Image: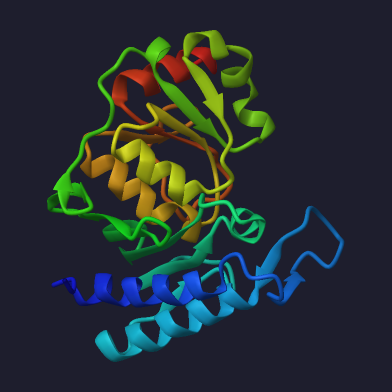
Amino acid sequence: MRALDPVQDLLLQAGRLAMEYWRTADLVVSDKSHGESASDFVSAADLAVNDLILDGLARLHPGVPVISEEIESTPGEPPPDAFVIDPIDGTHNFLAGSPLWTIALARTRGHDVEDAWIHHPPSGETSRANRRSRTTHAGSPVSVSSVLPRRGLVSVSLTHEVMPLIVGSTSFAGIRAYGSHAYCLAATARGEFVLHAGGGKAWDVAAGFLLVERAGGRVCDLRGAPCSPFDTTRKTLAGAPHVVDTALELLGH
């Protein structure tokens, strides 16, 4: 059955296109870092999915600017109305044949996220949120986890700022590093992780932040202050409020 939401329908089309590239041996890949830092791969799949979404958004919402991982942009204040996309979040996983990747899309108003979609092509499932409605996954309402921290899994991006969480891992059932902010934030919104800790660009986290918030969760920086997905200078915590409190204690705040 086709999605009633035209943007979600566009993501389903993009997901089918991505799946045509997934686990193919002759996929063209380049390294955006040019050997100057850790590998930052972009594949023909990223670019093809990016182009499909850009074309679709231009038809559905003409004139609304798009901020994408695959479009060079000048840092600065976000526009008053924009779409923010990561055509394949978790490119390294995608290239390795792992299913831990997604297509992430958010609509933003300045620093605020108004709408969010994270589509997982390997399962065909989409997580969806709006500033005025509850988060859903595959069409059903979801909530962040209510279990005690010691019974819950925490996902992290491996940055030195979150090392106290890893050192204090006995406070949780386990620590996981999956390599896709969007995948982990969507999983946090539906209670599979009690917390996601790390940081990324707006296209990595904007959609996921709203999913977590509208599932009853809390998003803040490592000192407990509210944060914008466009502020890449601060690492973040997103998850069940009581687990965010535990993480802040481990971080000394």
Percent across and percent down for residue 20 are 51, 75
Is the residue 14 above or below the residue 219 in the image? below
Q: Which residue lies most toward the right here?
A: 35
Residue 189 or 75: which is nearer the viewer? 189
* Direction from residue 68 to residue 105 in the image, left or right: left
* Direction from residue 203 to residue 214 in the image, left or right: left
Residue at screen point 75% across, 72% down? 30
Q: What colour scheme has been applied to the protein in the rendered image?
A: rainbow
Percent across and percent down for residue 70 are 58, 74
Residue 155 seen in render: yes
Residue at screen point 30% across, 49% down? 210
Residue 72 seen in render: no
* Direction from residue 38 to residue 92 in the image, left or right: left
Is the residue 220 above or below the residue 6 in the image? above
Query: Where on the picture, by quarter, is residue 123?
Result: bottom left
Is the residue 52 above or below the residue 147 in the image? below
Residue at screen point 74% across, 69% down? 32
Percent across and percent down for residue 243 are 37, 20
Residue 117 or 71: which is nearer the viewer? 117
Query: Where on the picture, by quarter, is residue 36?
Result: bottom right
Looking at the rendered image, the quarter that the N terminus falls into is bottom left
Percent across and percent down for residue 137 are 24, 49
